[in-house]
Amino acid sequence: MAPSIPRYIDTVIIGNGPAALILSYILHGNIPYYAGGHPDPLLDAKLSRSRTLLDVTPDLYDHFSSSLRYSTQALPINTLLDTLLRPNADTELNPPSCVCWKYEPQKAVPHIVLGNTAAPGGQWQENAVSASWDIGTLSYAEMLSLPGLTFADHWERAHGQPMPDFVRPSRREVADYLSAYPTAVGISDSIFNSQQVSGISRTRDGFMIASHNMRCKHLVLGSGTFSMNIAPQPPLAELANLRTKSEPLLVVGSGFSAADAIISASETRQIIHIFKWAPDTRPSPLRGCHHQAYPEYAGIYKKMKLACKQSPTNTSKQRPMMRRKSKSSLGNRDWSTTYEGYPNGSIKSVNVQENTATIQIQCANGTISDRTIGELRYVVGRRGSLAYLQPSLLKEVVGEATSPVNPVVSTRTLRQKVEKNFQVAPGVFIIGSLAGDTLIRHAFGSCVHTAANLIREHSIVSERRHSIQNPATQKHARERSTRSLGKNVSPHGIPSSNCSDQNSLAESSDSDGGGGVVLEDHRDLHIDRRTLPRAKSRATSPTRQGSRRCSSW
Ligand SMILES: Cc1cc2nc3c(=O)[nH]c(=O)nc-3n(C[C@H](O)[C@H](O)[C@H](O)COP(=O)(O)OP(=O)(O)OC[C@H]3O[C@@H](n4cnc5c(N)ncnc54)[C@H](O)[C@@H]3O)c2cc1C
Ligand SMILES: *[C@@H]1O[C@H](CO)[C@@H](O)[C@H](O)[C@H]1NC(C)=O
Ligand SMILES: *[C@@H]1O[C@H](CO)[C@@H](O)[C@H](O)[C@H]1NC(C)=O
Ligand SMILES: *[C@@H]1O[C@H](CO)[C@@H](O)[C@H](O)[C@H]1NC(C)=O
Ligand SMILES: *[C@@H]1O[C@H](CO)[C@@H](O)[C@H](O)[C@H]1NC(C)=O
């Protein structure tokens, strides 16, 4: 029988995306430790003194800012966990992980995850811009792995053979992986999908969740920043309902989602693409895409660039767009006849007929073009919403940083606050993209830090309860909560990360993703990883790489 949502629980996590899944894994009692072997001697020395990664203190990463080794884009604690999980990921293929996970059930914190998608995985289960499910992700597979079951493990289960190197899975494959994850690692008892949460308010000793008529002591916001598309303003808004596939598609946007919309269109469809073009001040995120690693994005970037060459001057009298042969990586589309790019174009007027519309486009050079279109994809970015918090709690969390009526949040809204503390209000924590670092590889810091706080508070409370009932157990309980008594079986009897071998989190690699959104500005992200040297001591298979024995200490 499926478990039902309790009336009261210690911790409720809002959102069922990758960050919520990582946190739930830890709160089930799977505790990360430093396994040793990080190539940064300073970091290695600091961590070798105290291997538990639940007690991460700023002195561990205060040398990062002066070191070229580390990205300064992500929050330091996210960078720390990333480099421990995937040391040298940007220069080495499948580097061994420096983190191992021990199952310590005495540290588990009762919690549930409430997310509105039908399956676990958050935004990976949605298709907000109706792009093709077969588009490859920006991240290579290793960068998408969650603890306890790597993407490669999942691949091997599904395909019956080891995953090859350099896989960029499709969105569908990532969604399938995340759906399978909770059961595979034994955390599905806590995950509740298709749950729209609303009306959360603070009570005297915790929080009330009106939509579910339940209470909790701690709240974790993992609701992400990508659940809503930024809607078109008038006059473009009038085009939102057009669905005439036989007429041209108007794509507005300059990022990945715009590129995805173009890639997803039928090859014979006419595409009119309006995009911002400011390479010096705000370059398109597509610019960094290496042509070998990301041929489709690099290809579309090239088309956009070419359109710019032709537009600002008025020397060329022929139709825009090149006469060059298209690369096969961009499919069989005849770009010269089907793609028109309008850098810095703007819509002057819109005239909707029944199923189509005529629009006037003002080009950067001032010329006006009339075009008929059958459909609009407006993909200039996505946002999240904190409308599920009642006004006074909302105010505690975001202050004046967003509208109380329509509390839209971006990756920047809470960033400054989390730079000080992931606990943004008493008892309220923030994880994942809401904390400003969007990539899955950068979700671990916020989750580990939040878990550490929840575990600490929970063990204090249960000790107190214990000692009231039976003072003799007090000492015992404290010992239990501070010592690591690793066991090998996860809550559901599935052998899990015992810090010895194959089940440790094994990841490496990198990338970026975004929906017309400029995610973190990772300059290092779009490199062609296929040129990377393999790890010196490449373990037998990708699933086994990245783990070391914890048992020796
Ligand atoms: C198009 C696109 C491509 C991307 N590609 C990559 C990539 O290749 N690699 C990578 O690492 N990252 C990528 N990302 C970044 C993405 O942020 C992360 O992969 C990851 O999904 C972040 O996880 P999260 O748990 O923080 O939030 P999310 O995955 O955003 O999940 C949060 C969930 O909470 C739900 N929610 C919100 N409010 C409520 C409510 N009131 N009640 C219930 N549920 C609620 C949301 O609808 C959402 O489903 C991409 C993002 C986008 C938009
Ligand atoms: C587009 O506008 C930006 C300023 O917003 C400018 O820097 C850029 O040169 C323009 N590009 C074209 C092709 O007109
Ligand atoms: C376009 O060309 C005409 C002459 O053909 C010239 O008068 C005009 O200044 C040019 N406009 C721009 C923006 O270069
Ligand atoms: C202005 O730019 C558009 C494309 O953006 C192009 O089709 C047109 O020929 C240009 N006009 C002139 C006068 O150069
Ligand atoms: C860890 O688990 C594996 C099986 O998953 C087992 O073979 C191994 O002995 C365990 N190691 C330790 C140190 O308990």
Image (spheres, rainbow, N blue to C red):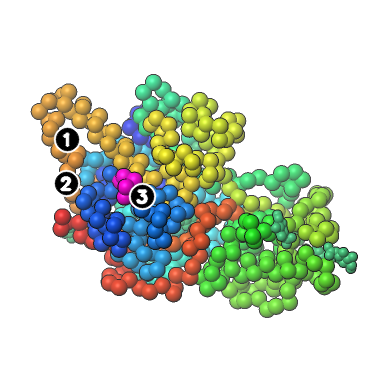
Q: Which mark is residue 485?
A: 2
Q: Residue at x 37, y 45 (%)?
A: 447
Q: Quadrant of residue 316?
A: bottom right
How crowded pointer 2 is (Cα within 10 Å; few <14, some 14-19, many 20+) is rated as few
Give the mark toward the camera: 1 or 2: 1
The residue lying at 59 percent from left, 68 percent from top is 298
First along the sequence among labels 1 and 2 = 1
The amino acid type of the residue labelled 2 equals Leu
With 333 as the anchor, is 440 left or right in this view?
left
Question: What residue is drawn where x is 33% and y is 66%?
Answer: 95
**Residue sitting at the far bottom:** 325
Mark 1 neighbour density, 10 Å: few (under 14) some (14–19) many (20 or more): some
Estimate the spatial distance between the alpha carbons at disc 3 and disc 2, rounded to whole Å.
31 Å
Q: Amino acid at mark 3?
A: Asp
Can you identify the residue that label 1 sits on? 478
Q: Which residues are magenta?
A: 56-62
**Of the pair 341 and 216, the residue shown nearer to us:** 341
Q: Position of residue 318 (x, y in %)?
A: 82, 73
Query: Helix, strand, or loop for circle 1?
Result: helix
Q: Quadrant of the image for the N terminus?
A: top left
Residue 231 x/y as whole percent: 66, 45
Name the spot of residue 522 as percent of width and height, x first: 50, 58
- Which element is circle 3 on? loop
Earlier-in-chain disc, 3 versus 1? 3
Q: Residue furthest left?
A: 472
Which residue is denoted by mark 3 in the rendering? 62
How many numbered discs? 3
Q: Identify the mark nearer the N-term, 3 or 2.
A: 3
